[in-house]
Image: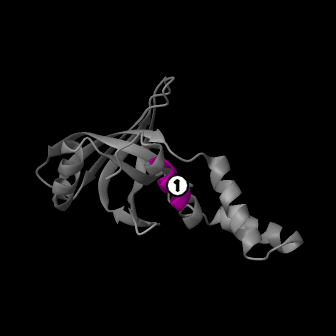
């Protein structure tokens, strides 16, 4: 069974000098499809401004991969980091439509663990730790920077993907 959701936001996660920078791509419209197959494939279709055409065209020509952060349905949902490959780019009368094939790159348990590690490293303990943890999880609009850096480095080092 296939599940389809509205794409709320799309950010490129780009590695520069050992850090990951998020670049929000404003979307006009979009959807994300969970194929619910054994290979855990997702498809992301986003209608975006024409200014991104050359970027996505270059990635496709290089058979490259892009690490992205997506939020589905509502701004209140937690982001999902996905490793993607450009399937098609279609020019529209206003903007372009980009179809990305994707796989989850970061599971929710890893995010929770990273939030907790960050709080412990910041010196929180006991009740303060619990309070801060609940606050961070409720307001998690993006992955912790440490999680993004780790996933980007891991993907880059394992050699399975050609990160652009």
- The residue under label 1 is 79
Q: Is residue 161 visible?
A: yes
Looking at the picture, how far across and down is residue 155, in whole percent?
Answer: 47, 48
* Residue 112: percent from left, percent from top: 68, 55
Q: Is residue 144 visible?
A: no
Residue at horizontal 63%, vertical 55%?
111
- What's the magenta region? 148-155
Taking the spot 31% from the left edge, 57% from the top edge, the residue there is 27
Vertical side of 133 occupied by 69: above or below: above
Q: Is residue 41 left or right of residue 52?
A: right
The residue furthest bottom is 123
Residue 119 in the image: above or below residue 74? below
Number of callouts in the render? 1
* Nearer to the camera, 15 or 143: 15
Coloration mode: one colour
Q: Is residue 62 left or right of residue 104?
A: left
Image quadrant of residue 126? bottom right
Residue sitting at x 73%, y 76%: 122
Residue neighbourhood size for the residue with mark 1, other residues' Cα within 10 Å, grouped as few (<14), some (14–19), many (≥20):
many
Helix, strand or loop: magenta stretch: helix
The x, y position of residue 88, in whole percent, is 22, 39
* Local SS, label 1: loop
Q: Residue furthest left?
A: 93
Q: Is residue 42 magenta?
A: no
Q: Is residue 1 left or right of residue 124?
A: left
């Amino acid at each position: 069974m296939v599940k389809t959701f509205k794409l709320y936001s799309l950010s490129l996660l780009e590695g520069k000098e050992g850090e990951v920078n998020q670049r929000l791509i404003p979307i006009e419209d979009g959807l994300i499809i969970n194929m619910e197959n054994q290979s855990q494939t997702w498809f992301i279709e986003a209608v975006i401004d024409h200014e991104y055409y050359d970027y996505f065209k270059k990635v496709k020509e290089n058979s490259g991969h892009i690490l992205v952060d997506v939020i589905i349905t509502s701004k209140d949902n937690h982001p999902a980091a996905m490793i993607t490959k450009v399937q098609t780019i279609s020019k529209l009368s206003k903007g372009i439509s980009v179809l990305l094939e994707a796989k989850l790159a970061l599971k929710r348990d890893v995010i929770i663990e990273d939030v907790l590690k960050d709080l412990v490293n910041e010196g929180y303990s006991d009740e303060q730790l619990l309070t801060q943890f609940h606050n961070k999880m409720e307001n998690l609009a993006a992955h912790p920077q440490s999680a993004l850096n780790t996933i980007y480095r891991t993907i880059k080092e394992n050699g399975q993907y050609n990160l652009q």
